[in-house]
Image (cartoon, rainbow, N blue to C red):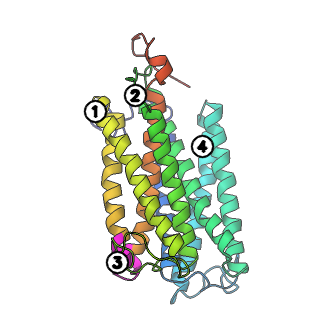
Amino acid sequence: MIGGKTALGHNPGDPLAGLHRYAFAVALCTAVLVFAGGLVTSTGSALSVPDWPLSYGSLFPPMQGGVRFEHGHRMAATCVGLLTIGLLVFLWKREPRRWVRRLGLAAFGAILLQGALGGLTVLLLLPTPISVAHACLGQTFFCIVVSIALFTSPGWRRAGPAAPAPAAALSLRALSAATAGAAYLQLVLGAFMRHTGAGLAIPDFPLAFGRLVPPFGEPGVAVHFAHRVGALLVACCAGWTVSRVVRQHRAEPALVRPAVLLSALLAAQVLLGATTVWTRKAVLPTTFHVLTGAFVLATSLVLALRSFRLVAAPQRAAGYLPQPARRVAT
């Protein structure tokens, strides 16, 4: 405990402190699950266990070869599923805001659908649409639990009135939302690239077949190049958003911290993407590329949500009158 607060910023006696810590733990476990799922694809282990929901007709098959990755992923998914049930119960007992409780229901529905898609992926022998949907729903579920952790945090619940937003062509709200949207679309492209085997369709980096724009005669080149263009789009959106935070909201740590983290994650993501190509899709850089992409999405989402919480809409900014700080319970 530091200064009368816990490490996560809770005051003693906060009735939602336990709920926030639990939601935060579920989000961390979901990140581990994303990494485990990435390992399955990176090692080519998706059909190492050919049946579902059992594994070779048992709950615990011999953990050899690709089975340890595929069955390990199933065990991690089961753990996250059980934790999600606990989160739903916890929300229904402690959380007074109905919309936050409904997010818990959304998380529960998403994890059920995710399990079904995972089973269909195996039983139907890795059809691309279902495999891509499975990957994208996993990222969506991660966003939901990260949002629940944010909404139950003391900083969110103690936030005062929104600060005025300086006049600009695009507000911080719009920029941060565009960044989060671009990050999600980029993950969709990445999932499609991975599940169509286009990860090395362009074998060099930063150029593409020694050119800025590659020839599109080979299969998968267009998908791979679209992913690279998407990365550039995300970087531009994020750079614009971060620069706006630094220039106009540097006194608000709730905005500065995720902006700085987003910059660091993007730099790491570009390096991991390059290393994936340079090492011919070595397992660890490829899998960490997937995980870091999830962190980029989650961080951009947190920045967007906090922007909507802490910064007034542009049309309201001109008539904004400072008010005393107050606790907001909604």
Name the residue located 60 percent from the left edge and 50 percent from the top edge.
86
Q: Earlier in the sequence, mark 3 or mark 2?
A: 2
Query: What's the distance in space between the residues labelled 1 and 2, CA to CA?
Result: 12 Å
Q: Earlier in the sequence, mark 4 or mark 3?
A: 4
Q: Percent from the top left, x then y, of residue 310?
A: 43, 27
- Of the two numbered discs 4 and 1 in the rendering, the one whose residue sits closer to the viewer: 1
Pick the residue in front: 285 or 90.
Answer: 285
* Secondary structure state at the residue bearing disc 2: loop
In what quadrant of the picture does the N terminus appear? top left
Q: Tell me if residue 137 comes above or below residue 167 in the rendering.
A: below
Highlighted magenta segment, given as a residue range: 274-285
Q: Are marks 4 and 2 in contact (CB under 8 Å)?
A: no
- Of the two numbered discs 1 and 2 in the rendering, the one whose residue sits closer to the viewer: 2
Q: Percent from the top left, x then y, of residue 229?
A: 45, 61
Pick the residue in front: 47 or 194.
Answer: 194
- Magenta part, dominant SS: helix
Callout 3 amino acid: Gly
Q: Earlier in the sequence, mark 4 or mark 1?
A: 4
Q: Are marks 4 and 1 in contact (CB under 8 Å)?
A: no
- Labelled disc at residue 115: none
- Labelled disc at residue 210: 3
Q: Tell me if residue 227 comes above or below residue 146 in the rendering.
A: below
Callout 4 amino acid: Phe
Q: Earlier in the sequence, mark 1 or mark 2?
A: 2
Q: Which residue is mark 4?
A: 90
- Labelled disc at residue 247: 1
Tally the numbered discs: 4
Name the residue located 28 percent from the left edge and 36 percent from the top edge.
246
